[in-house]
Image (tube, rainbow, N blue to C red):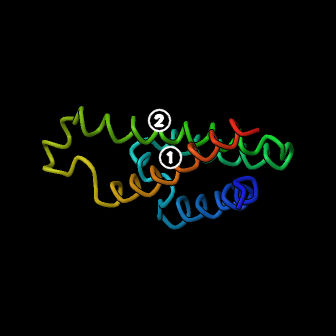
Amino acid sequence: MSIARILPGYYAATVLFVILDYFFGVNVRVAFLEPWPAARFGYYVACIACFVLILWRPARATFVAAFESLVTLIALILGMGVRVLVPNDAIFAENADIVTVKEVINFLIAGSVAYLSWVKGLRDLVNR
């Protein structure tokens, strides 16, 4: 199955994830951006922009997916890596976890999907 066939549904699901996140407090898609609400909102806007772009220019869907996957991987690495490598004083004062189990699970799922999408997108772009 071509990545270009899956993408519209993936990006359209962003609306569902926004509703779950902002109205029901269930952050499934971008738990790694939980500490940064502005970045989380920006990520949702970027995903919706990707959806509009692939509907407008379907021939560029593979490029859009590969680029968005790269951005997601960078955000995951920075979002989790900075918190693990540079813990802040609040973590020590409150005896809190550096990262939660929910964030680790989200990191593994989102990271795996983003990596596979990145590799598949690059392969498709090279084979054109």
> In the picture provided, is 53 more to the left or to the right than 122?
right
User: Which quarter of the rendering shows the N terminus?
Assistant: bottom right
Circle count: 2
User: Which mark, by number, is residue 74?
Assistant: 2
Q: Is mark 1 on a helix, strand or loop?
A: helix
Mark 1, other Cα within 10 Å: few <14 / some 14–19 / many ≥20: some
Q: Residue 122: percent from the left, percent from the top?
A: 62, 39
Q: Which residue is drawn at 85% across and 42% down?
A: 57
Q: Residue 94: percent from the left, percent from the top?
A: 15, 48
Q: What element carries label 2?
A: helix
1 and 2 marks in contact (CB < 8 Å) = no
- Name the quadrant containing residue 3: bottom right
- Report the front residue among 25 and 85: 85
Looking at the image, is mark 1 or mark 2 nearer the viewer? 1
**Residue at mark 1 to residue at mark 2: CA–CA distance:** 11 Å
User: Which quarter of the rendering shows the C terminus?
Assistant: top right
> In the picture provided, is 119 more to the left or to the right than 59?
left
Residue at the spot of label 1: 115
Q: Residue at x 19, y 43 (%)?
A: 91
Q: Is residue 18 above or below residue 90?
A: below
Q: Residue at x 22, y 36 (%)?
A: 87
Amino acid type, residue under disc 1 in the picture: Tyr
- Report the front residue among 67 and 87: 67
> In the picture provided, is 45 more to the left or to the right than 26?
right
- Report the front residue among 124 and 85: 124
Q: Residue 46: percent from the left, percent from the top?
A: 65, 41
Amino acid type, residue under disc 2 in the picture: Ile
